[in-house]
Image: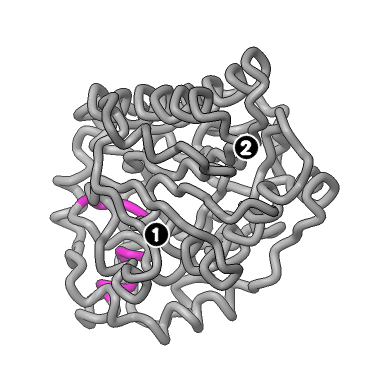
Amino acid sequence: MNNKSILITGGAGFIGSHLVDAFLEQDFDIIVLDNFSTGRPQNLDHVKEKIQIIECDISQVGQWQNKFKNVEKVFHLAALADIVPSIENPDKYYKSNVNGTFNVLEACRKHNVKKIVYSASSSCYGIPDEYPTKETAEIRPQYPYALTKNLGEQLIMHWCQLYELPAVSLRFFNVYGPRSRTSGTYGAVFGVFLAQKLADKPFTVVGDGTQTRDFTFVKDVVDAIIAAAKSDVSGEIINIGSDNTYSVNQLVELLGGDVVHIPKRPGEPDCTWADISKAKKLLNWQPKVSLEEGVGILLDNIDYWREAPVWDKKSIAKATEKWFEYLS
């Protein structure tokens, strides 16, 4: 990438803040757009003097769109990303993930951005028929979060086709690592387990724990995003995963601690596992961080989760009532 100005939506978030770090090492001028609904200002505290941070709401047309002027490449990571809240408040998710993406695309088009890389979600596959799952698998979103992220991807691909805006959509699988969200909503397993470990509480394992997930370390994901941006690839949808799938029981063993079991949830696959042959071929990318190594890095950074809510069987049952109500 020759021009040194890039823009990252959701740059204060989990993946976005790691992307900021990576581009700073390469001397880029970086503009971050974030409304701090899920992103945390402290994720950028160590670099805030070196970048431009704009607090704004991309779901609303506004002055923030002028920041796209003279930007070479855009990385669209801003999104709302939880299952239960998306069932309870689909309007918020539609505005953020669909309207927000539309507004970002129109800013790109107006200011002749050279490329956009979109962070899509593997949740679009729902419960797939095949593992590892290829990009050609049927789209079966089970809840509004998955649906709105896929609608955003359709917008990206349409702007690429019709307006010739070079674009790549990366479907992330189960991304984990330092700075993953600690917010109040019951969500990703790593944040739940790390807060429980800090509080010396048992891990709340869904079902019997034999379900597997394609846990992908955040540095590998950032490397894939950068590879997509640097490549000539456009108009492609590409899975990004670890090239493996791991049981929740394996994760618990690595973290070390007692376990309590909670009911299996409807609408959740028994396995997530990306076929990443397309990423290897088109992006010349492959993951490098093993689960053992990644969990070790997390445990070295466990204090990040000290203020995260500590969930137990009772509070999880209450938090997931709507999940069972609508997806059963």
**Which is nearer the N-term, disc 1 or disc 2?**
1
Magenta segment boundaries in residue numbering: 185-196
Residue in the image at 50% along x and 37% along y: 123
Q: Position of residue 320 (x, y in %)?
A: 23, 42
The answer to whether residue 63 is above or below residue 289 is above
Residue in the image at 20% along x and 62% along y: 311
Residue 190 part of the magenta-drawn span: yes
Q: Position of residue 227 (x, y in %)?
A: 70, 54
* Colour pattern of the rendering: one colour
Residue in the image at 77% along x and 38% along y: 233
Q: Amino acid at mark 2?
A: Lys
Quarter of the image containing the C terminus?
Answer: top left
Q: Nearer the viewer, mark 1 or mark 2?
A: 2
Residue on which the image places disc 1: 14
Q: Amino acid at mark 1?
A: Phe
Tell me the CA gap for discs 1 and 2. Answer: 22 Å
Q: Is residue 148 left or right of residue 247?
A: left
Task: Give the number of marks.
Answer: 2
Q: Position of residue 268 (x, y in %)?
A: 45, 39
- Our reading of the magenta stretch's main secondary structure is helix
Q: Position of residue 326 (x, y in %)?
A: 28, 25
Q: Which mark is residue 101?
A: none
Q: Is residue 194 left or right of residue 212?
A: left
The answer to whether residue 267 is above or below residue 217 is above
Secondary structure of residue under mark 1: helix
Quadrant of the rendered structure where residue 122 is? Answer: top right
Are there few (<14), some (14-19), or many (20+) residues within 10 Å of tag 2? Answer: many
Are there few (<14), some (14-19), or many (20+) residues within 10 Å of tag 1? Answer: many
Residue on which the image places disc 2: 115
Residue 252 appears in the rendering: yes
